[in-house]
């Protein structure tokens, strides 16, 4: 599982979050992170 910082957009791996005290961006220290799902993006054609 990977997370993306809501401020700087840095990608943080869940393994790094376990090391850090609490959920926080390891780049800028921002506390709002969003879950990054698998890169497979399904597009539906709107006809
Ligand atoms: Zn950040």
Image (cartoon, helix red, strand yellow):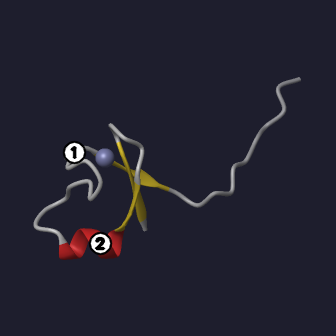
| Local SS, label 1 | loop
Residue 8, image quadrant: top left
How far from the left and from the top, in percent, is residue 28?
A: 25, 47
Q: Is residue 46 left or right of residue 32?
A: right
Does 13 sit above or below residue 25? below
> Residue at horizontal 20%, vertical 50%?
29
Q: CA distance from mark 2 to mark 1?
A: 14 Å
From the image, tell me which residue sits under label 2: 16
Residue 15, image quadrant: bottom left
| Local SS, label 2 | helix
From the image, tell me which residue sits under label 1: 30
Determine crowd level at label 1: few under 14, some 14-19, many 20+ residues with C-alpha closer than 10 A.
some
Determine crowd level at label 2: few under 14, some 14-19, many 20+ residues with C-alpha closer than 10 A.
some
Query: Of callouts 2 and 1, which one flags the residue occurring earlier in the amino acid sequence?
Result: 2
Q: Disc 2 beta carbon < 8 A from ligand 1? A: no
The N terminus lies in quadrant: bottom left
How far from the left and from the top, in percent, is residue 6?
A: 34, 40
The reply to whether discs 2 and 1 touch (Cβ–Cβ < 8 Å) is no
> Residue at horizontal 13%, vertical 62%?
22
The C terminus lies in quadrant: top right
């Amino acid at each position: 599982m990977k997370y993306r910082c809501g401020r700087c957009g840095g990608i943080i791996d869940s393994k790094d979050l376990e090391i850090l005290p609490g959920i926080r961006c390891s780049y800028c220290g921002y506390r709002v992170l969003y879950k990054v799902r698998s890169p497979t993006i399904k597009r539906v054609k709107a006809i």
